[in-house]
Amino acid sequence: MSTATATVAPPEPTITPAPPRRSRRRTVKRVLGATALALTVAAGSAYLWLDATSDVRNLGQSDCGVVTPDITPTAAGAPTADDHRAVCDALRSMTDAWGRGDATAYGERFTPNATYTTYVGTHYQGRKDITAAHRALFDGFLKDTRLADSFLGIRFYGPDTAIVTTRGDTYTGTPKKASELSKTQTYTLVRQSGRDWRIAAFHNTKRQSVMERISFLWDPSTKPEAEK
């Protein structure tokens, strides 16, 4: 007698349905959003660290008169202590005119053909141009502001030309500390007649503290001697 062997059919495979396309998109968006947020937080933290560690050491002097001038004599001679005081007086007179909001007196501290370049790159030519622009500024968003300066250096080229470099800024209320001044400025002054000094050229540069810090970290040899 033969025995029949029963054939057992294999179990049907379990088919897992694919997740809905919308669900996958939502997951991708969440991952990308979390990644973007992490990168933003990291970039913000790096920026704050760079900004916090970008202090300058060369803060200058609040009193122009105590800065020892660098003197280069020429065939015309060399400046005197009176010339040093006169240059400081000319800059003080300009600062006082700004504080009063007096555009006419401010413009008078410049030569008739002076040039004036702001930190945003605006370039004015001549006393008339400078005066008109500051009249509008003193009546507008610079109304009731004052100037703060910290003097980095004074260089005389003969008895009739001086270059003064400063850290500077505008303020209202309490004067800013030297470490808070955000701009670096260059004044070129010339003697007009006798001891009368006026500004022939002014250039204002906004200090980019974070970019400066990155530059120093990338290549320390770019750091000025006074900052080492």
Image (tube, rainbow, N blue to C red):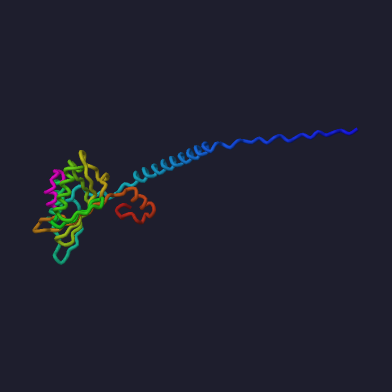
Front residue (pair 226, 194): 194
Residue 19 shown left or right of residue 196 in the figure: right
Q: Position of residue 200 (x, y in %)?
A: 16, 57
Residue 214 shown left or right of residue 163 in the figure: right
Residue at x 56% of width, y 36% of height = 19
Marker count (numbered):
0
Q: Position of residue 126 (x, y in %)?
A: 15, 55
Residue placed furthest toward the right: 1
Q: Is residue 68 visible?
A: no
Residue at x 19% of width, y 54% of height = 124
Q: Position of residue 204 (x, y in %)?
A: 23, 52
* For residue 130, above or below residue 139: below
Principal SS element in the magenta part? Answer: helix
Residue at x 17% of width, y 46% of height = 136
User: Does the magenta-highlighted stretch encompass residue 103?
Assistant: yes
Q: Which residue range is magenta in the image?
A: 98-109
- Could you tell me which quadrant the N terminus lies in? top right
Residue at x 36% of width, y 46% of height = 50
